[in-house]
Amino acid sequence: MEITRVRLRFLTHPHVCGIILPIHLCQKLQLRPRQKITVMLGKKEVVATVLQDRRNPDSSIVKVTSLLRSELGIPHGGLINLKREGEVLRLGPAIGIVTTGIRRDPRQPIGQRTSFFHKLLLAQEGKGVFYFIFSPHDVDWHNHTVSAWFLRKNSKGSFVWRRLTTAMPDVVYDRIPSRSAEKHEAVQEFKYKLASYPHLPVFNQGFFNKWSVHQLLYPNPDVNEHIPETYTAPSLQTVRNLLRKYPIVYLKPKNGSLGYGIVKVVRQPGKGYEASYHTGNGNVKRHFTKLASLYQHVFRTRRIRNYLAQQGIPLMTFHGRPFDFRVHLHKNQLNEWVVSCTAAKVAGSGSVTTHVRTGGTVIPGDELLSHLFGRQKAIITERIKQASIRLATAIEQAKGTDLGELGLDMGIDTRGHVWMFEANSKPGRSIFKHARLKHADQESRRLLVDYSCYLANF
């Protein structure tokens, strides 16, 4: 049955567990006065009595009694969606974002990441959802409830954090912040219980490993043209063989992020080899006459089994500096992949990577492509978009889990071919700090809500 958007209000009535609907809504939902119906919020359900609001027959206001509110754990009133499914009347959807590091401080409930989650929850505006943050410690599995933080407007119109107990959500968005947090006993136990919880979709679980993503995509004829040649735990001979085929080879940590630990190896005919990398003190370049010496230097403090060797791509340049793209993709309410943002990252002077941390700069992708390609910009933009959507589709199918967003690091070589260097299941949002990407930031956050509604069947 179709979804109806209503305004939810609460009625002080301590003795009746009831839901009061205007006459036209009763007719639309095929409900009779005094009928008993199961009302559901998230994973909690309560049998309630249907009552008609005869005073306001054409209103879009639905009222619930204090008893029903209490038993269901309805956190707040306002705009919400109503849907009848068989003998159940659903309110919601309830969308929970799970993370760690939650505190009982109403000013900064998620510590230094509070502003990040504040922005995420702003996307609830006008969507008619219950949207909240919780941690694995906050779940009462026996009562199907969760103690969560909501972002609500106070009487002055300012947003404030409120901690409320509510029903276990319809859908969970995984924002566990790091691989180390993933390993915590409480997180592991939570994920184990969640996996056996009936009909509770979770999206973007866990982190990607560069090698496992490569193994998923390289054999796939639909996308392997975009995947650089890569080897795990590279021996000296493997690196040597790659350098015979390509003038540049990258040595990358399998589980790295933000460009940490990446070494760029360049073959200089007749002169030897050059290794470039970033340390805490800045960008470093070292020359070696023999590849064996370079290899020993790189893996003196690094474990070979934790590394990959990858074909270097001769990237296009902007003002003499190589650049790549962060393509942010989302699933929409129709379960289709869409590109919410394409940002160009231009390498800093002497940097191995395009990361902002090592001196890189972010430019809206449209602007850079217009500068480089002029009238051909639309062709290149479409090429990047289609490759990204095909890659996202292939990753989700191969993983066999729900993915609502992906961050792909993509590049264009000097011949105009599109490559993918990395896929992130927990993409950072630093690119959205650029003033001209503000709309893309808002669209990206709205799409997270839209996909959650799809998974929740709303």
Image: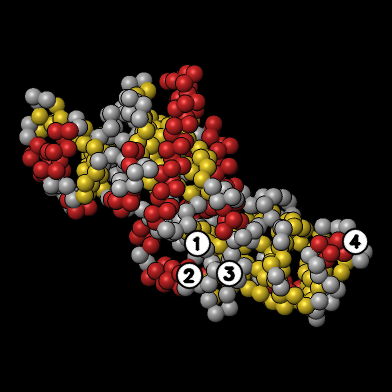
Query: Which residue corresponds to the image point at 53% horizontal and 76% vertical from the top-left?
Result: 141
In the rendered structure, which disc, 2 or 3, sits on the residue that comes first in sequence? 3
Is the C terminus in the top left, top right, bottom left or bottom right quadrant?
A: bottom right
Is mark 3 in CB contact (under 8 Å) with mark 1?
no
Q: Which residue matches tag 2?
A: 194
In the rendered structure, which disc, 3 or 1, sits on the residue that comes first in sequence? 3
In the rendered structure, which disc, 1 or 2, sits on the residue that comes first in sequence? 2
The answer to whether residue 70 of the structure is visible from this angle is: no
Q: Position of residue 282 (x, y in %)?
A: 27, 36
Q: Position of residue 390 (x, y in %)?
A: 43, 43
Work out how far the residue at label 3 is from the one at label 1, CA to CA, in angstroms: 12 Å
Q: Which mark is residue 56?
A: 4
Work out how far the residue at label 3 is from the one at label 4, CA to CA, in angstroms: 32 Å
Residue neighbourhood size for the residue with mark 4, other residues' Cα within 10 Å, grouped as few (<14), some (14–19), many (≥20): few
Hey, what amino acid is under mark 1?
Answer: Val
Q: Which residue matches tag 3?
A: 168
Residue neighbourhood size for the residue with mark 2, other residues' Cα within 10 Å, grouped as few (<14), some (14–19), many (≥20): some
Hey, what amino acid is under mark 2?
Answer: Leu
Is mark 2 in CB contact (under 8 Å) with mark 3?
no
Work out how far the residue at label 4 is from the one at label 2, CA to CA, in angstroms: 42 Å
In the rendered structure, which disc, 3 or 4, sits on the residue that comes first in sequence? 4
Hey, what amino acid is under mark 3?
Answer: Met
Is mark 1 in CB contact (under 8 Å) with mark 2?
yes
Q: Position of residue 78 (x, y in %)?
A: 74, 58
In the rendered structure, which disc, 4 or 1, sits on the residue that comes first in sequence? 4
Q: Under tag 3, what secondary structure?
A: loop
Display colour scheme: secondary structure
The answer to whether residue 52 of the structure is visible from this angle is: yes
Q: Which residue matches tag 1?
A: 202
Work out how far the residue at label 4 is from the one at label 1, CA to CA, in angstroms: 39 Å
Hey, what amino acid is under mark 4?
Answer: Asn
